[in-house]
Amino acid sequence: RLLRSFGGRPLGFAGYQCEAAPRREGPNRYWERCVVTLAGPEGRRRMRLFGSIMERDGRFKFVSIANDL
């Protein structure tokens, strides 16, 4: 759905915002409810493009791809 919505058009990354502090579980940190700001010909748009992100030892992994599309 993401490619169908934005494919073939210019699109830029303008920023992101997550909850103030990640949830901790042992050595893992979970960043949740992140919103990405995209910049395109129609202007800027804020969207959830994925679910949680897990961080461990400076490495990041998408835990889910739930989004607003």
Image (spheres, rainbow, N blue to C red):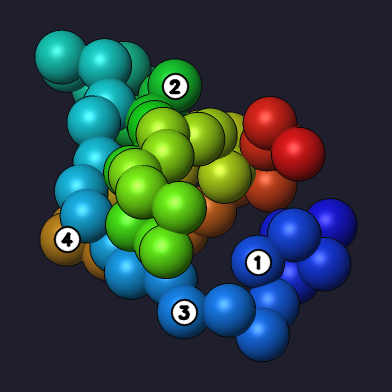
Q: Where is residue 26 in the image (x, y as percent from the top left)?
A: 30, 28
Q: Residue at the location (53% across, 53% down)?
A: 62
Residue position marked by numbered label 4 in the rendering: 58
Q: Is residue 56 visible?
A: no
Does 13 appear above or below 30?
below
Does 8 appear above or below 14?
below
Q: Residue at the location (15% across, 14% down)?
A: 20
Distance in Å between CA atoms under marks 1 and 2: 21 Å
Label of residue 10 in the image: 3
Mark 4: secondary structure: loop
Q: Nearer the viewer, mark 4 or mark 3?
A: 3
Total numbered badges shown on the rendered structure? 4
Distance in Å between CA atoms under marks 2 and 3: 25 Å
Q: Is residue 1 visible?
A: yes
**Which residue is nearer to you in this view: 40 or 20?**
40
Q: What amino acid is at disc 3?
A: Pro
Dot 3 alpha-carbon crowd within 10 angstroms: few under 14, some 14 to 19, many 20 or more: few
**Which residue is nearer to you in this view: 3 or 57?**
3
Distance in Å between CA atoms under marks 1 and 3: 8 Å
Mark 3: secondary structure: loop
Label of residue 6 in the image: 1
| Residue 54: quadrant of the picture | top left
| Residue 13: quadrant of the picture | bottom left
Q: What amino acid is at disc 4?
A: Gly
Please report whichever mark, 2 or 3, sits nearer to the chain's N-terminal start.
3
Residue position marked by numbered label 2 in the rendering: 33
